[in-house]
Image (cartoon, helix red, strand yellow):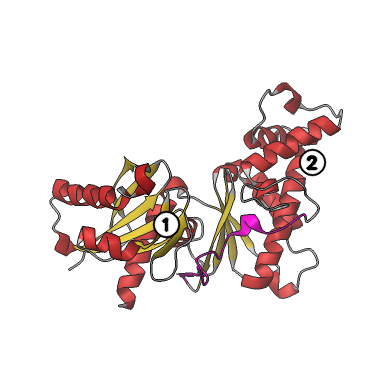
Amino acid sequence: MKHYVFGIDIGGTTVKCGLFTTAGELFDKWEIPTNRANGGESVPWDITQSLTAKLKEKGIDKSEVLGAGVGVPGPVTEDGTVLKCANLGWGIFNVNDKMSELLGLPVVAANDANVAALGEMWKGGGAGYQDIVMVTLGTGVGGGIILNGKIRAGSNGGAGEIGHMIVNPQETRHCGCGGHGHLEQYASATGIAYLAEQALRETEQPSGLRNIEKIRAKDVFDQAKEGDALALSLVDQVCEILATALTHVAATIDPQAFVIGGGVSRAGEILTEGLKKHYGKNLLNALCGKEFCLATLGNDAGMYGSAKLMIDRAAED
């Protein structure tokens, strides 16, 4: 009988590891450093060594373990092939095959944003829904699509990259990806800070933001909550841009709910209420009335989703 499953979330700095029961209870969690030397070649080995050591520590035999789900910070195809991963230095190879060989257990991999979305649907802010789009607002803007309870990664693993939707074709600034006018340039933490700095340069409107030497997105939301007029207008601008982008997503995906995560989501209700205010303008009635939920699993979402991915894959076999 298989009682346990591993959920792994590989990041550029650390690898988050979780040992779960197959019912979805987090039994233990820990981290190991991500060794990116030599193109990250030791990362699969480091992970499998850590998982094996954890089983020994807990007195668990491999025969009791279903396998391991793995979230990877880059595009991953349905069969577990990574199509290059700049954050780790990886080229093209099959994570499922490589790690399964090292670990001696079944392994299934998917994009980290997608498994985070799966985790939030399973045990987080999206619980109770089967069709969600998770929107991650951090240094960048990421996304994950879950339809009928399953990750939808697209033909090359690139589905859900909503941060690179074009929302302003006239923008001349470069996005981190090299493009122009992408959602990430306006709705990410760095994008919101840029908009604030731009507004302070272009207007003499009084604002508490002028007393802050290096403005962060959090400062904009904090000032808005205190009634600062300029900050309120910036929050409204960001919410309108993001909500408009999500109407385009809805017209394609038609989810039940949008789950908002990432550091910016800590702003809370002021963000979700702003999105509700602007969402659905000039949209088909059938696509209106979506729920906007805040993610609740934080940095553990990827571990939960990876574990769920392995559980689902095992059930299909």
At horizontal 16% and vertical 60% (from top left) the residue drawn is 62
Estimate the x, y position of residue 11 in percent, counting from the top left: 42, 47
Side (left or right) of 65 relative to 276: left
At horizontal 20% and vertical 66% (from top left) the residue drawn is 2
Range of the magenta residues? Answer: 149-168
At horizontal 46% and vertical 70% (from top left) the residue drawn is 149
Q: Is residue 3 visible?
A: no
User: Mark 2 or mark 1, which is nearer to you?
Assistant: 1
Q: Which residue position is annotated with label 2?
A: 233
Q: Residue 155 carries which label?
A: none
Amino acid identity at mark 1:
Gly
Estimate the x, y position of residue 98 in percent, counting from the top left: 29, 61
Of 286 and 171, nearer the camera is 171
Could you say which quadrant of the image residue 105 lies in?
A: bottom left
Q: Which mark is residue 91?
A: 1
Q: In this view, does 96 lie above or below 169?
A: below
- Report the quarter where the N terminus lies: bottom left
Give the structural element (helix, strand or loop) at label 2: helix
At horizontal 19% and vertical 51% (from top left) the residue drawn is 52
Q: Tell me, yes or no, whether the highlighted magenta stretch contains residue 242.
A: no
Estimate the x, y position of residue 21 in percent, counting from the top left: 27, 58
Of 61 and 171, nearer the camera is 171
Of 12 and 297, nearer the camera is 12
Of 270 and 65, nearer the camera is 65
Estimate the x, y position of residue 264 in percent, counting from the top left: 60, 43
